[in-house]
Structures are given as structure tokens and as C-alpha cells.
Image (tube, helix red, strand yellow):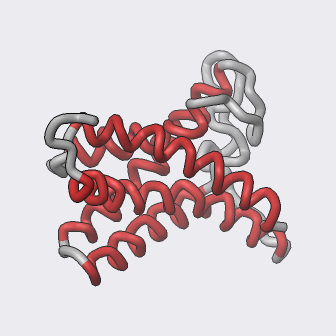
Amino acid sequence: MMTGFSMYLLAWHFLIFLPAMAANGAPLVTGRLLRLRGKKTHPVDGGRKFIDGKPLLGKSKTIEGAVAGIIVGTIVGLLIWVFADSYFIEAGFIGGLGAVLGDMIGSFIKRRFNVPPGHDFPVLDQLDFAVFAALLLWALGVPLDPVYTLVMLPIIFVLHVSTNKLAAKTLP
């Protein structure tokens, strides 16, 4: 057990990361709902290729999904604000934006390694959104403790794997 470890600070860090975690799942749900309704989605990269001739991000990274992720992250921040502090409104938006950008960076890396959209790239897929959200939150002044942030990463990893398995079983 770490000296001075605080469950309160761990819970605070969990709340800070919750909007990013919700934002990370929103594009998947949004994409499936739009496809069920026969709606077309629009790739963020517009189908463009990188200098290596491979897709920049791939067709699974859509404008609709990115917007949904940012909105969901912000809404989760608003919901936390109801019970905690107005600080979480900004953290929700920043965490949602960071999660979406981190996921896109992860997709960019996956395309360079010839990993097709929708295929797993272990660890990168589970943590790209959280690491980038943490970096953006920290850069914009959210006081993240490095130790608690590192403790959160395996928790986020397990939650990500678990919720993805649940989503695969329940979403159409």
C-alpha cells in the first residue's frame, strides 16, 4: 500500500476520467444507431491517404462519432457538476475532446501498422483515448496527480475491455 494513498483522490481522478471514458464509447454507439437508421456517416479524413498511401485514419473515424464523443463527454461533465463542482463542466469537455483526439491518433498509428479499422491493437486501443485526455487535461491546467493518473490506467484498461465485451453482446 502506498504511503498517503487516498481513496478520495482516486475517486476524484476517476470522476475526471469518466467523461473521457464515456466519450470514447459514444462514437461506436452513434455509428451503430446511424447505420440502423440507414444514415450515411462521414469520415473525418474524407477518405484521404497519408504519404505512405495508406488511409489517414480510416472510414471508422467519423465526424458524427467525433461530435458525439465531445457532446457525451461534456454531458457527463455536466452530470458530475450537479453532484460536485462546476470545474467538471470544463473537464468534461476537455476530457471528451482529448478522448476523441487520442482515439484518432491511435487510428493513425494503427493504419501505419496495417491494422484495419475495427481490428484490435492491444493496449493502444484501450488506452490511447485516456492518455491523450490526461495530457490535454494536464496541459489546460487540470491538477492531475501523476501517481493517481498511472493508477487509473489499469482501471481504465479493465473497464474498456469489459464494456467493449458487453457492447459486443448487446448492441446490434
Residue at 43%, 44% in the rendered image: 130
Residue at 48%, 46% in the rendered image: 156
Q: Name the quarter where the N terminus is drawn.
A: top left
Residue at 35%, 56% in the rendered image: 14
Residue 21, x across and y down, in percent:
48, 56
From the viewer's perspective, is residue 121 above or below residue 168? above
Residue 147, x across and y down, in percent:
25, 35
**Left or right position of 163 against 34:** left
Residue 64, x across and y down, in percent:
61, 63
- The reply to whether residue 49 is visible in this rendering is no
Residue at 72%, 45% in the rendered image: 59
From the viewer's perspective, is residue 171 above or below residue 48? below
Residue 39, x across and y down, in percent:
78, 71
Where, by quadrant of the figure, is residue 153 drawn? top left
Front residue of 26 and 18: 18
Front residue of 1 and 114: 1
- The reply to whether residue 172 is visible in this rendering is yes
Where, by quadrant of the figure, is residue 76 drawn? bottom left
**Left or right position of 62 against 96:** right
Q: Name the quarter where the C terminus is drawn.
A: bottom right
**Left or right position of 50 against 132:** right
**How many tags in the picture?**
0
Front residue of 76 and 166: 166
